[in-house]
Image: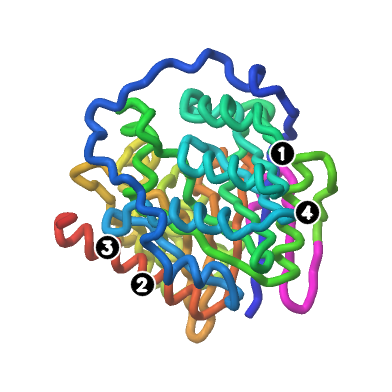
Amino acid sequence: MQVALFCVSSLGYVKLSSEQAMERPVDPYFLLFYTTKMSYDLARLPEATAKAAGGFSEECFFGSPSKPGALQALLAQAIDRVPAGGEILWATYYLANVALMERLRLAALRGVKLMVALEARPRRPAVNAEAFKRLGALTGLSLVPVRSQIYAHLHEKLYYFSHPQPFFLVGSYNPSMDASLDADAVLDIGDQDQGHNVLVQVDSAQAVERVRQHLRAYLGEAAPVPYALTDELAVTFLPEDGRAPHLQWLQRDWQEIHIAMSHLRDGTVVNRLGRQARKGCKVRIICHESHRRFPARHEHALRDAGVEVFRYCHPRQFPMHSKYTLLANGTERISLYGSLNFTKTSRWLNREVLVRSDAARTYDSLLANWHDIRQEIERGYG
């Protein structure tokens, strides 16, 4: 099994105080319609979290309307397993979940070394306000507000844990939901705990150490390795030139392509997928219902080329936030997953993480999830 990890960098960042990171004060919020939100039973997933703790090189975990709070529970129990002297390193775009912040606080109190790199200027600044307020003053936790140049963002969703054995979780999930958010914010960013998301656990020692070094670079205590190649994996921190690995893979000839992608606005990707379909490749895509995230002109272009397109339109407006691509040609099967959207912003500017894997179990797990989402659409979300 080979795993290749790609971290797409932005144009740089600066460290700010929690006060500087937020450009406006925290507004008081009352969530009016969100009264049906689950209470988050953090003990509800013993089997899944046991798998995350050990033994596997890769393991996929999914959140969905049928598994509300699953990925929050996964992160919570991973935090709880790290003992005094251990280390937790996170980089994420949104962090609003107070329950997870409380677990991070308790971890700091028991002597765990913690670092959280958090986007300082997300689309919805108020979503991260509570995290800057709570974690910014927490002894034992290094909070790094990341403010990039131009329109770039820290968009990674990358979570490292040193115990019971070193591993990281990577994928599409932001811990961005909490009962303190107002209805408008929830509708805008989507309920990440009840929509579709994926986190993949990787415990390959070499990949884990590269990720740890990448995350510690946010503290200025380590320099990211620009390129490393071993018999097992390749880890690349890409320059800001837009040459993202997914474009290279989409250049090759494939027999089948399955994609679950919340944002698809990059015309280059649309053109390459259209060429694949015209050459006889079976291309099938599930995207979010939002035309901001997936413009109608791109949908029409893909359909005209013969691509099967499915929009996820849940009646309660839960999002399809997953971000993975599955490529098959004979016996060759490749999985691409992580935080990378198919947008020019992700390709050229954002700090993103993209994992390429040829593990059969990872491909099979993600493909089964793709079919589950499609069947949910065909059932009318019942």
Q: Secondary structure at mark 4?
A: helix
Instruction: Residue type at mark 2: give it.
Output: Ala
What residue sits right under mark 3 in the picture? 374
What colour scheme has been applied to the protein in the rendered image? rainbow
Give the camera-side residue of 47 and 65. Answer: 47
What residue sits right under mark 1 in the picture? 140
First in sequence: mark 3 vs mark 2: 2
Give the camera-side residue of 16 and 339. Answer: 16
- In percent of width and height, residue 261 lies at 42, 53
- In percent of width and height, residue 34 lies at 26, 34
Q: Identify the residue at image location x=37%, y=47%.
A: 193
Instruction: Residue type at mark 3: give it.
Output: Arg
**How far is the residue under mark 1 from the one under mark 3?**
44 Å
Q: Are marks 1 and 3 in contact (CB under 8 Å)?
A: no
Q: Is residue 198 above or below residue 177?
A: below
- Figure quadrant of the N terminus: bottom right
Give the camera-side residue of 83 and 270. Answer: 83
- Figure quadrant of the C terminus: bottom left
Q: Secondary structure at mark 3?
A: helix
Callout 1: 10 Å neighbours few (<14), some, many (20+)?
some
Q: Identify the residue at image location x=21%, y=42%.
A: 316
Q: Are marks 2 and 4 in contact (CB under 8 Å)?
A: no
User: Which residues are drawn in magenta?
Assistant: 228-245
**How far is the residue under mark 3 from the one under mark 4?**
38 Å
**How far is the residue under mark 3 from the one under mark 2?**
10 Å
- In percent of width and height, residue 46 lies at 42, 67
Q: Which mark is residue 213?
A: 4
Q: Is residue 160 left or right of residue 28?
A: right
Give the camera-side residue of 156 and 304. Answer: 156
**How far is the residue under mark 1 from the one under mark 4?**
19 Å
What residue sits right under mark 2 in the picture? 368
